[in-house]
Image (spheres, rainbow, N blue to C red):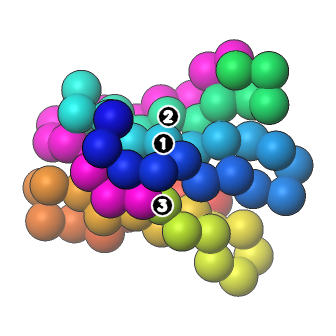
Amino acid sequence: VRASPTVDAAGNVYVGSRDNHLYALSPAGQVLWKHDSGADFDSTAAIGPGGVLYVGCDDHHLYAFH
């Protein structure tokens, strides 16, 4: 993990990893979901209006999750 985690209003944690996944974790640490991009997620995610999660990836894409 190279980036800082991001925490939403419900306490869920979002963090990218060098294993090519972006993880969503519950406040208790349970994996809620993970997304495999095929490239590292080295940047810190940001939460925008409406709770949309934005994060850049080493595959040269900006991802948006809702």
Mark 2, Cα crowd under 10 Å, few <14 / some 14-19 / many 20+, is: some
- Mark number, residue 23: 2
Taking depth in this image into account, of 62 and 44 the one nearest to the observer is 44
Q: Earlier in the sequence, mark 1 or mark 2?
A: 1
Residue 49 on the magenta segment: no
Question: Which quarter of the rendered picture does the N terminus lie within?
Answer: top left
Q: Which residue is mark 3?
A: 45
Classify 31 as above or below 59.
above
Pointer 1 and pointer 3: residues touching (CB < 8 Å)? Answer: yes
Residue 33, position as x, y percentages in the image:
57, 29
Q: Which residue is mark 1?
A: 15
Taking depth in this image into account, of 5 and 63 the one nearest to the observer is 5
Question: Please, what is the three-letter code of the amino acid marked with disc 2?
Answer: Tyr
- Can I make out residue 64 in this image? no
Classify 43 as above or below 24.
below
Pointer 1 and pointer 2: residues touching (CB < 8 Å)? Answer: yes
Q: CA distance from mark 1 to mark 3?
A: 7 Å
Please state the total of marks drawn on the protein image: 3
Residue 39, position as x, y percentages in the image:
15, 42
Classify 46 as above or below 1.
below
